[in-house]
Image (cartoon, grey):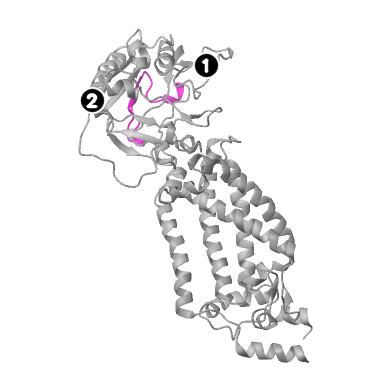
Amino acid sequence: MIRDPKDLQRYTPQERANHWVVGISFILLALSGLAFFHPAFYPLTYLFGGGTWARILHPYIGVFMAFFAVLMYLRFWRLNVMTKTDKEWLDRIGEMVDGNDHNMPEQGKYNGGQKAMFWALTVCVVLLTISGVLIWRAQFSPPIGLVRFGAVVHAVAGVVMIALIFVHVYAAIWTKGTIRAMWYGTVTRAWARQHHRAWYRETTGK
Amino acid sequence: MALQSLDIARRSATTTPAPGARQTTEVAKLIDVSTCIGCKACQVACMEWNDLRDEVGNCVGVYDNPADLTDKTWTVMRFAEVEQGGRLEWLIRKDGCMHCADPGCLKACPAPGAIIQYANGIVDFHQENCIGCGYCVTGCPFNIPRISKEDSKAYKCSLCSDRVAVGQAPACVKTCPTGAIMFGSKEQMKEHADKRIRDLKSRGFANAGLYDPQGVGGTHVMYVLHHVDKPQLYSDLPKDPAISPLVSLWKGMAKPLASLALGAVALGSLFHYVMKGPNEVSKESEREAEKEESQ
């Protein structure tokens, strides 16, 4: 529990718990979902006690995640409204990826990329939840055309979301000093000053 | 290895070829709708041979009984009263799995070995590998598989694969009192159908023909129909059945490509880190932040 009192609070305990509830459910969903996505991943069903158990559990974990994803959306959506600066940031994203952030515009709590990620993930969760209900045979039996459509949407949104989460996780690993914000809530002042200057000013008054 | 006549040709959720050195004769069941009298002996024989006892249902006002296929009813007679050329026709069709050459159920199934296509053309469900997801229902162009409410496994007509394996005809064929259901090699059945169709045409059914839809690569259950141009008359037998383009999209090349794309994103991240290095907080930022703190 030793912390530098000068560190900045980025996430409250509730926000962190919410994030990890969604994160863990997502990992379980991705592993069981991939198993049904392509035969190459079918052995992943063994992590869940076999194919039938994976089939039974996947939709319930999905409902659970959807619920906590909505809570997380309500916590964070206001902070993720796109501004002109964010668009400018996104226009220069190539430089950022190239490892040069000198010309990047000043960012608030979230940069344009994080906001784009937030909205893309939101769309994925909505599509996955609705299409998931359509193909949940054990509970529902909608018209066959809808089920087929739902199956395609679920597969596409699932792949896109897994790819987005890869990027999300990598961005956190790449940007040193970031992951601690989701582990115990704080970041260093230098980190905030470098990556989220506007938020740094707002929080510290400097 | 399976029994000689049951060599495996295709297996669900399996991406490598099945053993294919041996060739067996393609079989087919031919249902001559024009000589069916709707006695339902085939339904009884199916129950008896396969040890199936569905719940006794209610009369729903028509002859169809039970009213639909279920996990425990693998074949039903469907009775349609239609007017053709100013005459009433009573068209009775024995419904059940068509044993497609290109089975939508097998294509959709995510569980390895839950659906098998034998070299003789029979498509069989192996319930011990079935996970109960219902994708077979999604894939089938004929709406045949049914998921049990008790065990969540998928069931349908097996074309009595156990009987065929030892040289017997399916139970429904064996019992049909008018010979409307026949069984043999697909070639023989087509030849027999030709004779029946010639006879029907000579009796004024100009559009009589064989229902062996090519959209699913042909089927191993075929019908002789008086009106092959209008299969919908026979309780909505589909006109040009094919695996839905949505199912092909869902289960086609997109998935291996998407899997590769996911791998590429993961590897791309790794190589980005290796080649560009981590995005660390610069010494300058640290100095500046410290300076600002102390102000």
Whether residue A189 appears in magenta in the rendering, the answer is no
Does residue A103 lie above or below B242 as drawn?
below
Residue B66 numbered mark, or none:
1
Q: Quadrant of residue B177?
A: top left
Give, as a single range, the part of the protein colored magenta.
B210-234
Residue B38 placement (x, y as % from top left): 43, 11
Residue A193 numbered mark, or none:
none
Q: Quadrant of residue B118?
A: top left
Residue type at mark 1: give it: Pro
Q: Which residue is mark 2?
A: B187
On the rendered image, what quadrant is the N terminus of chain A found in? bottom right
Residue B282 placement (x, y as % from top left): 60, 86
Q: Quadrant of residue A201?
A: bottom right
Residue, x 59% and y 85% (percent of image)?
A: A103
Q: Nearer the viewer, residue B116 or B196?
A: B116
Horizontally, residue A203 falls left or right of residue B4, namely right
State which chain disc 2 sits on.
B
Q: Residues within 10 Å of mark 2 (few under 14, many from 20)?
A: few
Residue, x 38% and y 38% (percent of image)?
A: B113
